[in-house]
Amino acid sequence: MTATETAVAEARARGAYPHVVDGKHAVDKLSAMDAIAAALSFPKHFGRNLDALYDSLTDLSWLQPGEHVLIWPGSDRLKETDPKAYLAVRAVLSDAQRALAPSGDRSDDRLLTVVLTEA
């Protein structure tokens, strides 16, 4: 079983909703954001910038209540091709995860967990 398959199985076992990012082509900031948006079925009005990414990640109102696990296999590909973009996107993911935590400032009936796995 791959690390991604394990992460999906663990999410499902605890009743969470896994969302796997297709990171194969996430080699710059825009393609990484598009891959995250596709994995989480962002609304069509997603603005394709870091602020819009944060806003969408901390809303998730179009998804079922509960924990949503964003699994990003091969995120190291972006880290290698565009380290600055990787750090920026990773910071947004971390900030959004904290904001949706039970003690976060945007917590509601949805949680976000981010898991980076090897491809």
Image (spheres, rainbow, N blue to C red):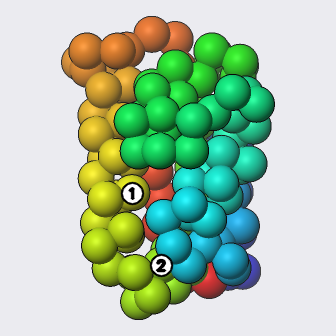
Residue at figure coordinates x 47%, y 44% from the top left:
49
Q: Which residue is mark 2?
A: 78
Label 1 CA crowd tier, 10 Å (few <14, some 14–19, many 20+): many
Relative to 76, say whether 35 is above or below. Answer: above
Residue at figure coordinates x 53%, y 29% from the top left:
56
Is disc 1 placed on a helix, strand or loop?
helix
Q: Nearer the viewer, residue 45 or 64?
A: 45
Between discs 1 and 2, the one toward the N terminus: 2
Q: Nearer the viewer, residue 32 or 9?
A: 32
Mark 2 residue type: Leu
Is residue 76 in sight in this rendering? no
Q: Report x, y in % for residue 33.
A: 56, 54
Label 2 CA crowd tier, 10 Å (few <14, some 14–19, many 20+): many
Q: Report x, y in % for residue 34.
A: 65, 54
Is disc 2 placed on a helix, strand or loop?
helix
* Quarter of the image that includes the N terminus: bottom right
Are the residues at dot 1 and dot 2 in contact (C-beta closer than 8 Å)? yes
Q: Is residue 38 shown left or right of residue 3?
A: right
Q: Which residue is mark 1?
A: 89
Residue at figure coordinates x 34%, y 46% from the top left:
92
Is residue 44 in sight in this rendering? yes
Relative to 107, say whether 60 is above or below. Answer: below
* Quarter of the image that includes the C terminus: bottom right
